[in-house]
Image (spheres, rainbow, N blue to C red):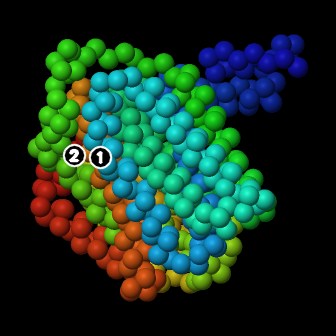
Amino acid sequence: MEFFISKGFLFLPGLILNSVPLQAEFYMCVMLDNLLSNKAFTVIRNRNFRLFLGYRFFMTMATLMQSVIVSWHIYSLTKNVLWLGMIGLVEVVPQISISLFAGHYIDLWDRKKIIRNSTFILLIGSGILTLYSIQSFHSYDRFGIWPIFITIFLTGLSRGILMPAHTALLGQLVDKKDYANAATWNSANWQVAAVTGPAIGGLIYGFSSILVAYSSVFVLYFISVGLINSVKAQKIVRTLKQGEEAIFDRIKEGIGFVIKTPELLGAFSLDMFAVLFGGAVALLPVYASDILHVGPEGLGFLRACPAIGAILMSFYLMFYPPVRNSGRILLLSVAAFGICMIGFAFSHIFWLSGLLLLLSGLFDNVSVVIRGTILQLYTPEHMRGRVASVNSIFIGSSNELGAFESGVTAKFMGLIPSVAFGGVMTLLVVAATAKINPVLRRLSLK
C-alpha cells in the first residue's frame, strides 16, 4: 500500500479517515511533526550541517576504532604499560607543534579543503597499519612497533589541523543564534561515534582478526573523505590586510585574545587540567586485562561507556541547553567527573566500572557543550581558526599528555593509586578555578 507524507501528516488512499487505527496513526504523525518542529532540531534541517555531522561521525568512529585496536595491539605485543603512555606522547607532540600554524591558515584558506586533505592523511596512516597487520609480511619481527608509532604521529599531525578546522567550519554552516544547538548536536554526534567506534573495534578485533580490524578503519576514513567533499560552506569575505599580516603576529593575536577573555581562558584551562589529571582512558587496556579480567570485547565496552553517558546527556541538553548559570554548572560537572574517576580507580567489578565511566561521560559532556558554545559566541569570525587552534592545544595536551601522565604515574605509583590521584587533582583544579576566575563562575550564556 502506498503512503504519502506531507508536513508530518499521513494519508492512506482508499481508507476511511475515521477508523480507529488510522486515527491513532494520524495523531502519532502529528506528534512527530511537533517534535521535529521543536527548536532542538533546528540545525538538523540544514543539509550541509547534516553532511558535516555524517563526516564527523565516520571520521571519529574510525579514529576511535583505531585507538582501541592500536592500544590493545601494542599491549599484547609488549606487555609494557609505559608503551601505552608513549602513545599519547607521540600523538600530542605533532598535534601541539602544528596547531597554532594551522589556526593561522584556517583563517586564510578554504577550511573544507583543509579538512579533506587532513582526513586523507588519516587514510594513509590507516593504510600503513593495514599493511603492517598482514601476517605474511612478518612486520613486527622486521620493524618492531615503529610503524604503529609512525601512524600515531600522522594521526596527531592531522588532529592538530582538524580540531580547529572543524570548529571554524561549523561557524560557516549555521546561524549565530543556533550555535548552542549546533554544539549540542555536534557533541552528541561525536559521542555516538565514540560509542560505536570502540565497541565495533573491540568486537572486530576479538571475533575476527587484526587485519580485518585495521581494514575496517581504512574503509570508514574513505567514506568520511567523500562526505566532507560534499559539504558546501558559506564563503567568508577576508580583507587584504588579513593576508598581509605576518604569521607570528596573527598567531600572537589569537593567543592574546584568549588570554584577555576570561570566559575562554577559564573554560579552556579547566578542561585541560581536569582531563590531564582525571583521564584514565590510556590505562583501560590494563584495567580490562589485569583488574577486570575481560578481553578486547570488554575493553571496547569500557571505552564506549563514557560516550554512552555523554549521549544520554546530549539528548537532555538538546531540549534544555545549559545557558543559565552556565559557569556554575561547568564547575560542578567537572567536579563530578573527578569523583567518578576516584570511584573507578578502586572498582574491581566490571559493571560498576562501566557505570562510573558512563557517569563520567555524562558529566563531561556538559562541560563540552558549554565550552563549545562559549568558543562560538565569544570569538569573532575572522579569528575563529586561531582561537580554535589554541583550544585544540588545550584539549590535545590534556588528552594525550594525560595519557602519558597516566602511563608514567601508573609505572611509579601503581595502577590504582595513579588513577585515584588524578581524580583528586581534578577536584583541586575545580576549586582553584572557581576561586581564581569569578567571571567564569558567574557566567550565564542566556
* Figure check: 287 above or below 42: below
Instruction: Please name the residue shown 51% across and 54% down the image.
Output: 150
Q: Amino acid at mark 1?
A: Asn
Mark 1 lies on residue: 391
Provide residue 47's location: percent of width, then percent of height. 53, 22
Q: Does residue 190 appear left or right of residue 31 in this picture? A: left
Q: Does residue 155 appear left or right of residue 15 in this picture? A: left
Identify the mark nearer the N-term, 2 or 1: 2
Mark 2 lies on residue: 264
Residue 239 in view (yes/no): yes
Q: Are the residues tagged 2 and 1 within 8 Å (C-beta)?
A: yes
Instruction: Please name the residue shown 75% across and 15% down the image.
Output: 4
Provide residue 10's location: percent of width, then percent of height. 72, 20
- Residue 6 or residue 60, whichever sits in front: 60
Residue 298 in view (yes/no): no
Instruction: Please name the residue shown 67% across and 20% down the image.
Output: 9
Local crowd size for mark 1, using a 10 Å CA cut-off: few (<14), some (14–19), many (≥20): many
Local crowd size for mark 2, using a 10 Å CA cut-off: few (<14), some (14–19), many (≥20): many
Residue 150: which numbered mark, if any?
none
Q: Quadrant of the N terminus?
A: top right
